[in-house]
Image (cartoon, grey):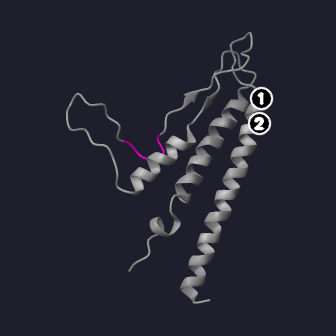
Amino acid sequence: MAITFDKALGIHEQALTARSRRAEVLANNLANADTPGFKARDVDFQAMLNQATEASQGVSMTRTHDSHMDVSGSGMSAELLYRMPHQPSIDGNTVDAQQEQTRYMRNAMDFQASFQFLDSKFSGLKKAITSQ
């Protein structure tokens, strides 16, 4: 029986990709905290992970009629969502820098945890291959 990376690593590779994507979006929000009219964005991490899981399991939706919505795409193509502000500024900017920093740091910690878990998977595979 052949071992594939998809089976050995599970969803953790896609989780790292999703966390990286979310980090980009949150960093963009922080960079534009003082830009008038800028709207804070975010991605739905759970939806991205669900799409990746379905794609890796071969479960996908197909169009059976021309009038059906097209829902095809890769597992990491989740759309950017606008965040509802608690207190929008007068200039129309919806970025709350403190909340964005908190979200960014939480995402960074989750990324590190996923990375460490993935690293332990590789260490286990290496030990299995070298018979240690």
Quick one: SS at disc 1? helix
Answer left or right for 76 relative to 123: left
Which amino acid lies under the numbered mark 1 shown in the image of this protein? Ala
User: Which image quadrant is residue 25 in?
Assistant: top right
Q: Looking at the image, do the residues carrying marks 1 and 2 touch, with CB atoms under 8 Å apart?
A: yes
Please tell me whether the stretch drawn in magenta is mainly helix, strand or loop.
loop
**Residue 48, position as x, y percentages in the image:** 50, 44
The residue pinned by badge 2 equals 101
**Residue 6, position as x, y percentages in the image:** 46, 65
Seen at 45% across and 52% down, the residue is: 53
Which class describes the residues within 10 Å of circle 1: few (<14), some (14-19), or many (20+)?
Answer: some
Quick one: SS at disc 2? helix
**Quadrant in the picture for the C terminus:** bottom right
Q: Is residue 75 magenta?
A: yes
Q: Is residue 71 above or below residue 109?
A: above
Which class describes the residues within 10 Å of circle 2: few (<14), some (14-19), or many (20+)?
Answer: some
Seen at 50% across and 41% down, the residue is: 47
The numbered dot on residue 97 is: 1
* Number of marks in the rendered image: 2
